[in-house]
Image: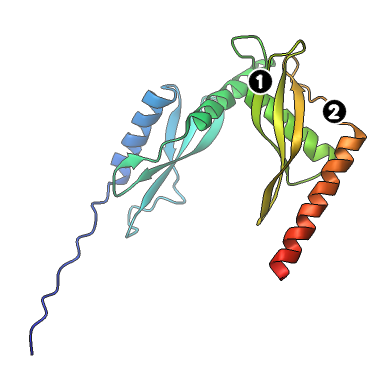
Amino acid sequence: MQAILEIPTVSPPIISLADAHHVARTYVATAIDPTFTVVSDRHTNDPQANPRTIWRFFMLCAHGPLCALKVDAATGEVIPLSATEIRVMREKAAIYAARTEGVLPLNEQGYVLGEYARKRADRYLGDQIGMYFDATDPVFVPRESPCWQVTIVFKRYHLGPFTLGVMDVDAKTGEPIPLTKTQLKRIRERTHAFIEFHTQTAAA
């Protein structure tokens, strides 16, 4: 009988929690904002767990939490945020700060921040239509009455996201520009059509 040599498997090196924390702090300080802090997610990070693939942290500003941040334990590198995600984090921090001062969060041009406009539109959609309707992707429209245009989407569990249209938010005040009754009715009808179609498709 011919002996079969077993080739030992080599596990990738695992970066320690302390080293991952240092990597995350360095990334935030250099790529996002040196005033932001990074704390470990104690409920997820277990130094005794094996194998460890991801270390998870939270990024915070002086006034509140911003987002989760992950470090690949095998490579020792941060899973980077996109340019849009970084912008949103900075704007969230500015919104927190403005709230503590009781003022509107404005950009350098004197208009409300895009993330603030998106949040106000989110609230409006929740009040006027219901849950699962969100405002996304704010785009500044430099018209005579400047506004932020947001995309209206529907997302419920495994359904969506479905794009349903756009709405505007006043860039000076941050107030959503109300949709007409006809627009609201059309959004509801399209949502029901999407739900019915995808429910029937799944059942088939």
The C terminus lies in which quarter of the figure? bottom right
**Secondary structure at numbered mark 2:** loop
Residue linked to disc 1: 140
Where is residue 148 drawn, in percent x and y? 70, 22
For residue 16, side relative to residue 97 (left or right): left
Residue at figure coordinates x 44%, y 47% from the top left: 42
Lower position in the chain sequence, tag 1 or tag 2: 1
Mark 2 packing: few (<14 Cα in 10 Å), some, or many (20+)? some
Q: Whole-percent x and y of residue 84? A: 53, 30
The spot of residue 167 in percent (x, y) is 77, 30
Q: Nearer the viewer, residue 142 or 95?
A: 142
Query: To which residue does mark 2 refer?
Result: 178
**Other-residue count near label 1 (Cα within 10 Å), few / some / many at <14 / 14–19 / ≥20:** some
Query: In the image, 163: left or right of 183?
Result: left
Residue 74, position as x, y percentages in the image: 29, 49
22 with respect to 186 (left or right)? left
Q: Nearer the viewer, residue 142 or 18?
A: 142
Q: Residue at x 81, y 53 (%)?
A: 193
Q: Residue at x 59, y 10 (%)?
A: 108
